[in-house]
Amino acid sequence: MKRLSKLFLLNWFYYSVQLVEFEDINFLTGKNSAGKSTLIDALEIVLLGEASSKNFNKAADEKSQRTLEGYLRTDLSREHPRSRVGKEFNSYIVCECYDDVKDSRFVQGVVFSCGQDGSHRHDFFTFRGAFAESVFVTDNRPRTKSELRQELKARFSTSYRIYDTDKNYRESILAMWNVHNAQVFSLLKKAVSFRPSKTSRSSSPKTSATSRTTPTSPPCSRTSAITSASSTWQKSRRRRSGALWK
């Protein structure tokens, strides 16, 4: 079985740098606006291979207006020290998966190259090997796309790819998951999205629970079902949350 083992974020909304490590079964819980949907939307981009806002988990908050631009630059004013509005920077969403049959790991992710003028472009990538933060960070800043390509070539030789199109990326990750039906992406959309449970009178109004679990296992070739797990925000082994990357 292949399961999600790590999620790494650089310059994604309020997460300047964040590593979340998953176990076999985890739960994603937290107060409203704690960042649950921010993590899920990041997962959706990498797992679905679509860098757009249409799959963002608006069901978590019917009034929310989640956009890719907002996640990249934050919704803070230009004057705020944590705002990335009007700045040139790179953002990363990276997932590591573990194959317990082959006892091996592979990584899939996306790099966003954002300009001062508000423009941005994205490039999906994969490589076979374990996650290492130094692949994506150099001199205390995220690598540019060209620097990422050089680093992947140096470390992983021919086992890495940076994709020209999203379609090619989706086809590649299906092969890495050993899945032969693209309908799995529709299943993933249903598995990842959630709605807050209605809180009881005794429950804190500031806390929401999820009615779905967060998938940590891409589907294997023996079944079309998705093995679901979730991430406990308090218990996930979060390594650090550093200063804002420039």
Image (cartoon, grey):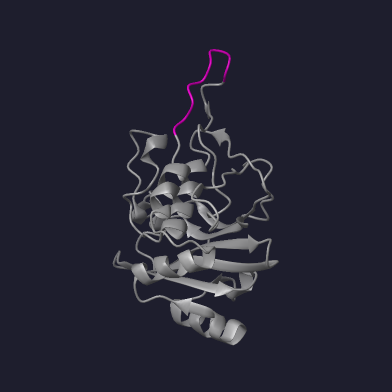
Indicate whether 150 appears above or below 6: below
State left or right for residue 172 relative to residue 104: left
Residue 76, position as x, y percentages in the image: 39, 49
Q: Is residue 208 or residue 50 the one in the foreground?
A: 50
Residue 158, position as x, y percentages in the image: 54, 85
Quadrant of the rendering where the N terminus is positioned = bottom right
Residue depicted at 51% across the width and 72% down the height: 126
Which residue extends farthest top? 201
Q: Quadrant of residue 69?
A: bottom left
Residue 221, position as x, y percentages in the image: 53, 58
State left or right for residue 47 relative to residue 54: right
Q: Can you see residue 115?
A: no
State left or right for residue 169 relative to residue 233: left
Q: Which SS does the magenta portion mostly show?
A: loop
State left or right for residue 215 relative to residue 105: left
Total labels drawn? 0
Residue 33, position as x, y percentages in the image: 48, 37
Residue 198 painted magenta: yes
Residue depicted at 58% across the width and 40% down the height: 28
Residue 7 painted magenta: no
Q: Is residue 109 or residue 31 the one in the foreground?
A: 109
Q: Is residue 92 or residue 123 the one in the foreground?
A: 123
Residue depicted at 48% across the width and 47% down the height: 40
Q: Can you see residue 191?
A: yes
Magenta stretch in the rendered image: 195-203
Q: Is residue 118 or residue 192 the one in the foreground?
A: 192
